[in-house]
Amino acid sequence: MKTLEKRIRTTVQQGNKAFVPYMMAGDGGLNVLNDRLLFLQEAGVTAIEIGIPFSDPVADGETIQQAGERALANGVTLRKVLDTLETRSHDVHVPLVIMTYLNPILAYGIREFIARCSEVGIKGLIIPDLPLEENVPFVNELNETDIALIPLVSLTSSADRIANIVSQAEGFVYAVTVNGITGIRNAYDETLVQHLQQLKASSPVPVLAGFGISTARQIEAFGACTDGVIVGSAIVEAFHRGDEQFIKELVQSSTSIRSLS
């Protein structure tokens, strides 16, 4: 079992739900990246998802797209992010997960990229535009590492496809809660809870819900039927406006969730 999955399982065994914030690397400059990692760790998060800015994102909503554009304007690249993470404080102990699209990795070189991730202590990869059918080169390179390749399950995935995805899953399964891109939402499909419960029951690894989760009430609702949540746009917005107290309150809201029977 890899470190990321161990950390999530430990959190759940302690009676809590996993809380994984997403932040855009380089939004505000790479010089603030390490400080934000330390802040999130101190706030009590389970792991941290670090987004890499990309010029043509397919899963990002307006908030994260704008953060990516600000980071790109600052000259941020995948290579620069990994170099910055290598120099981060040794006080950062929570698992770090890189979220990037496929093209920057191909430009870097798959083997070189994964080797570099291992060097800087990355524990998970999320690649939204990497199909299950084309992940073999990554799986082969990751087998001997402590880095988990985290799959996404959409609401439109068939039962057979979900079974195939979860059978290969590492770290956790990313349960996408909407048919669409990321971004703050006020309403979800009524059948979503049942879908998440069924996914959790069938998955050998923890299941975390993400996309559009932005309030304490949503964190409680989705956390109750999964092993935890991923919060992106709300965290990105809060960092952009300098509202760290809001982030702390979101993290704290995940500590008293009761699971649905």
Image: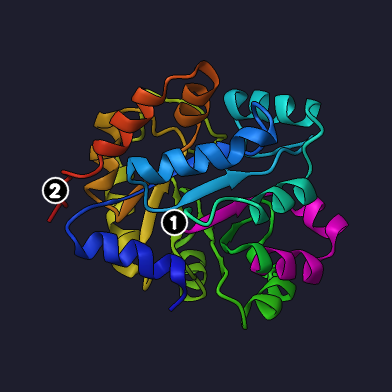
Amino acid marked by disc 1: Val
| Frontmost residue, 205 versus 99 | 99
Residue at x 68% of width, y 49% of height? 100
Residue 115 shown in magenta? yes
Residue 23 in view here: yes
Classify residue 116 by image quadrant. Answer: bottom right
Q: Residue furthest top?
A: 241
Give percent across and percent down for residue 199: 35, 60
Residue at x 71% of width, y 38% of height? 53
The image shows residue 150, relative to residue 79, as above or below, that is: below
Task: Give the structural element (helix, strand or loop) at label 2.
Answer: loop
Question: Which quadrant, please, contains the C terminus?
Answer: bottom left
In primary-sequence order, the first of circles 1 and 2 is 1
| Frontmost residue, 198 versus 62 | 62
Residue at x 84% of width, y 58% of height? 108
Residue 100 shown in magenta? yes
Amino acid marked by disc 2: Arg
Label disc, if present, on residue 258 of the rendered structure: 2
The image shows residue 176, relative to residue 217, as above or below, that is: below
Q: How far apart, in angstroms, are the residues tagged by discs 1 and 2?
A: 24 Å
Give percent across and percent down for residue 184: 45, 25
Residue at x 35% of width, y 24% of height? 246
Residue 177 in view here: no
Q: Which residues are magenta?
A: 95-118
